[in-house]
């Protein structure tokens, strides 16, 4: 599907981000793939290399990278309100070896990848710098093409940075402080707000990196839910549209439900889900609106691009590590014999996506339907 590139109106972009919120299955990797297909290939709103540059930056940030990428794209197209709308509606072999075999912490992988990218970009530019212009059907013409000048609103300024910090930090912490003043700073609501604020600042690598940390802390340290309930929440998040990180809302709901006084369980659970979601996603807008103007200005900087590209490769290794972990447990459940049904579904889905370019939605729905039928029959 090819259309002539034309800068979308705010209403057109709003309808797209709204649609994206209902079709973004498959966790961050699936959502990033959908964003690339829609923004770069079909609608041609953003050029290939500009998209990759934004993705590299979002991979470096703590928090959900797919949501931050959507916010970045919305901000590029329609300034701050475009970023708000986009963010609220959607929303590497060595790295793999380090995680899977040597159990290295993710921040060490990110730092090492960045250093390797800086060194590699200096001595092996053809291997590390991927932002050089190229020709092809997806780069022929775009609203914000790879060679287009940065829009005027993307220029950084100290005054703008000050306003962004003031507004975002006020929005971020006001609900947490208000709950503390009302119920005391030892209440579960406040503990959830503080914990998920911390997670939003230190969990680099997106949902796949944050989930092991949150699972351990929420289950073992805080006792907000059981390990089985955590797995139920993950399954729910994987099979519903929206960011995979929304499993944290499930955690916040159950944690507040179990410690609901002085409210009813439902009211407490709802408020817990709100404060969890709020402190998880509001920092995303701070990182994008504060940092994206500088990233846009440095889009032609080969050293920075090489470092960010290497970090993205490390994150790919993280995703591969998680895929292998899930694959082992699905194909060899409980360490038993091979699950041939799972092998068949995996091969069909892989071939369909790679060979016939199936969209993620029919793959998820089709696999779910086959799984339900297999359960009923066998």
Image (cartoon, grey):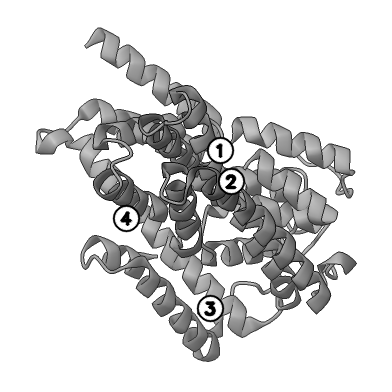
Query: Gap in Å between the C-alphas at discs 4 and 3?
Result: 21 Å
Whether label 1 touches label 2, CB < 8 Å: yes
Quadrant, the N terminus: top right
What residue would you read off at disc 3? Answer: 307
Marking on residue 274: 1
Asked which secondary structure carries label 2, the reply is: helix
220 to 140, vertically: above or below: above
In the image, is 321 to the left or to the right of 198? left
Query: Gap in Å between the C-alphas at discs 3 and 1?
Result: 36 Å
> How many C-alpha atoms fall within 10 Å of the one at disc 1: few (<14), some, or many (≥20)?
some
Query: Gap in Å between the C-alphas at discs 2 and 3?
Result: 31 Å
Nearer to me, 233 or 134: 233
Asked which secondary structure carries label 3, the reply is: helix
Seen from this angle, which residue lies furthest bottom? Answer: 123
Q: Residue at x 45, y 64 (%)?
A: 202
Report which quarter residue 22 is drawn in.
top right
- Counting residues from the start of the chain, the first of labels 2 and 3 encountered is 2
What residue would you read off at disc 4? Answer: 321
Quadrant, the C terminus: top left
What residue would you read off at disc 2? Answer: 278
């Amino acid at each position: 599907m090819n259309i002539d590139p034309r800068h979308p109106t705010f209403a057109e972009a709003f309808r797209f981000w709204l649609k994206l919120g209902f079709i973004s299955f498959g966790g961050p990797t699936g959502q990033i793939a959908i964003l690339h297909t829609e923004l770069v290939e079909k609608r041609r709103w953003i050029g290939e290399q500009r998209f990759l540059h934004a993705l590299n930056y979002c991979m470096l940030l703590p928090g959900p990278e797919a949501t931050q990428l959507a916010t970045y794209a919305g901000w590029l197209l329609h300034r701050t309100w475009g970023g708000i709308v986009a963010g609220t509606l959607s929303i590497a072999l060595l790295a793999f070896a380090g995680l899977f075999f040597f159990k290295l912490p993710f921040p060490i992988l990110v730092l090492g990848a960045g250093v390797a990218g800086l060194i590699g970009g200096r001595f092996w530019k053809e291997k590390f710098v991927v932002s050089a212009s190229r020709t092809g059907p997806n780069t022929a013409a775009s609203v914000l093409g790879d060679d287009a000048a940065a829009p005027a609103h993307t220029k950084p300024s100290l005054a703008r940075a000050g306003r962004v910090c003031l507004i975002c930090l006020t929005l971020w912490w006001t609900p947490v402080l208000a709950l503390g003043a009302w119920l005391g700073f030892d209440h579960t609501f406040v503990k959830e707000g503080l914990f998920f604020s911390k997670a939003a600042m230190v969990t680099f690598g997106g949902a796949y990196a944050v989930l092991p940390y949150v699972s351990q802390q929420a289950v073992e340290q805080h006792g907000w839910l059981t390990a089985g309930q955590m797995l139920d929440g993950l399954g729910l998040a994987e099979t519903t549209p929206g960011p995979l990180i929304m499993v944290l809302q499930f955690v916040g709901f159950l944690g507040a439900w179990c410690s609901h006084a002085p409210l009813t369980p439902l009211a407490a659970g709802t408020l817990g889900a709100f404060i969890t979601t709020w402190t998880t996603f509001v920092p995303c807008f701070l990182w994008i609106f504060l940092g994206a103007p500088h990233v846009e200005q440095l889009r032609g900087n080969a050293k920075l691009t090489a470092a960010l590209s290497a970090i993205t490769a490390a994150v790919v290794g993280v995703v591969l590590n998680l895929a292998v972990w899930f694959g082992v447990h699905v194909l060899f459940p409980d360490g038993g014999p091979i699950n041939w049904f799972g092998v068949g579904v995996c091969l069909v889905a892989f071939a369909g996506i790679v060979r016939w370019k199936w969209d993620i939605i029919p793959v998820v729905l089709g696999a779910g339907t086959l799984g339900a039928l297999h359960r009923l029959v066998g």
